[in-house]
Amino acid sequence: MTTKTYSNRIEKLEQTPADHKQRDAYFTTLAEHVKHHVLKEETEHFPLVKKLKRLDLDSITAAMKKRKAELIAEMGITEADEETA
């Protein structure tokens, strides 16, 4: 699932009234996708990182900051909101 898809699902959930019958289904679907994503990271990506003999933490940090900025821009988060992002 792409970041845009996650954003769309979160937006749909936020716009759905709390008493709407579909809200629980929207939440459950989103939660399952997030759980799947985390599991994939833990089982596929983390082991690959552990196998690396040498990590360039400066490059990794720079890449992560760049990606965070891209995601923040994609999601339309303001500077005030960025502190919690």
Image: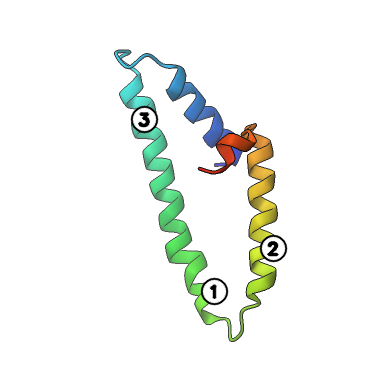
- Quadrant in which the N terminus appears: top right
Q: Which residue is mark 1?
A: 49
Q: Which residue is mark 3?
A: 27
Of residue 73 and residue 50, the one placed in the foreground of this image is 73
Amino acid beneath label 2: Ala
12 with respect to 3 (left or right): left
Please name the residue shown 37% across and 14% down the image.
17
Disc 1 crowd, CA 10 A, few/some/many (<14, 14-19, 20+): few
First of labels 1, 3 by sequence position: 3
Q: Are marks 1 and 3 in contact (CB under 8 Å)?
A: no
Q: Is residue 25 above or below residue 84?
A: above
Nearer the observer, disc 2 or disc 1? 2
Q: Which residue is mark 2?
A: 62
Q: Are marks 2 and 1 in contact (CB under 8 Å)?
A: no
Q: Position of residue 60 (x, y in %)?
A: 65, 67
80 with respect to 27 (left or right): right
Q: Is residue 22 above or below residue 43?
A: above
Disc 3 crowd, CA 10 A, few/some/many (<14, 14-19, 20+): some
Picture quadrant where residue 4 is located = top right
First of labels 2, 1 by sequence position: 1
Q: Disc count in the image?
A: 3
Amino acid beneath label 1: Val
Q: Position of residue 73 (x, y in %)?
A: 69, 38
Please name the residue shown 43% across and 24% down the image.
13
What's the CA distance linking mark 2 and mark 1?
A: 17 Å
